[in-house]
Image (cartoon, helix red, strand yellow):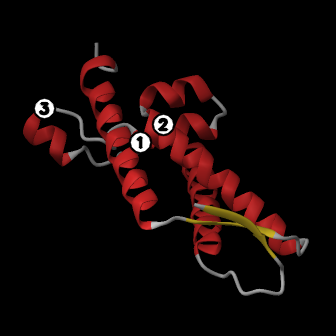
Amino acid sequence: MKIYLVKPDQPTLGLGVIYASIALAIIAGVWLYQWTIQFFQAEHLPILKCVFKKITHIPCPTCDATRSIHYLGHLKFLESLKMNPIIFLVTVLLINWGIITLAGRVFNHRRLKIEFGNSERKILVLFIVLTILINWFYLIFIARV
């Protein structure tokens, strides 16, 4: 794995801009959701139920993601983490990465670049898959008790 700073004059338009866009979209989505609820004076919006859960009666790995982001938008971090830990962590990471990336672009600072070798990529993929499985185990057996 190589970690280094990239000079602002070098083109680095890749994933940083994508992650920044996703982070801003999440922030805008949470704000729009909250505004819509207040505008219609509703307790909650009608949201489609999870098809996987309807068929199998088991929550999918992303069940309660909407409520997790909802609680995150209300700055209720513990409730958000309890709803779906992986969604909470990914959302917080994307928002922070997006803010840091945008700040780097606005102020023309050096950017952090990380490169992985083939074996490191395999380990990273294995780590991500195990994290999703552990999160799913949590949703099935612990969160619903």
Task: Give residue 65's quadrant in the image.
Answer: top left
**Residue positioned most to the right:** 107
* Residue occupied by mark 3: 57
Instruction: Quadrant for the N terminus, please.
Output: bottom right
Q: Nearer the viewer, residue 68 or 138?
A: 138
Residue shown at the point (62%, 28%) measured from the top left: 76
Q: Nearer the viewer, residue 111 or 61?
A: 111
x and y percentages locating residue 2 in the rendered image: 63, 64
What mark, if any, has residue 68 been given in the picture? 2
Work out how far the residue at label 1 is from the one at label 2, CA to CA, in angstroms: 5 Å
Residue shown at the point (55%, 51%) measured from the top left: 36
Dot 2 amino acid type: Ser
Query: Neighbour class for label 3 at 10 Å: few (<14), some, many (≥20)?
Result: few
Instruction: Quadrant for the C terminus, please.
Output: top left
**Is residue 19 left or right of 96 when viewed as pictured?**
left
Query: Neighbour class for label 1 at 10 Å: few (<14), some, many (≥20)?
Result: some
Work out how far the residue at label 3 is from the one at label 2, CA to CA, in angstroms: 20 Å
* Residue occupied by mark 1: 65
Secondary structure at numbered mark 3: loop
Q: Mark 2 and mark 1 in contact (Cβ < 8 Å)? A: yes
Dot 1 amino acid type: Ala
**Residue positioned most to the top:** 145
Task: Give residue 121's quadrant in the image.
Answer: bottom left
Q: Mark 2 and mark 3 in contact (Cβ < 8 Å)? A: no
Q: Which one is earlier in the sequence, the residue at label 1 or at label 3? A: 3
Residue shown at the point (43%, 43%) measured from the top left: 66
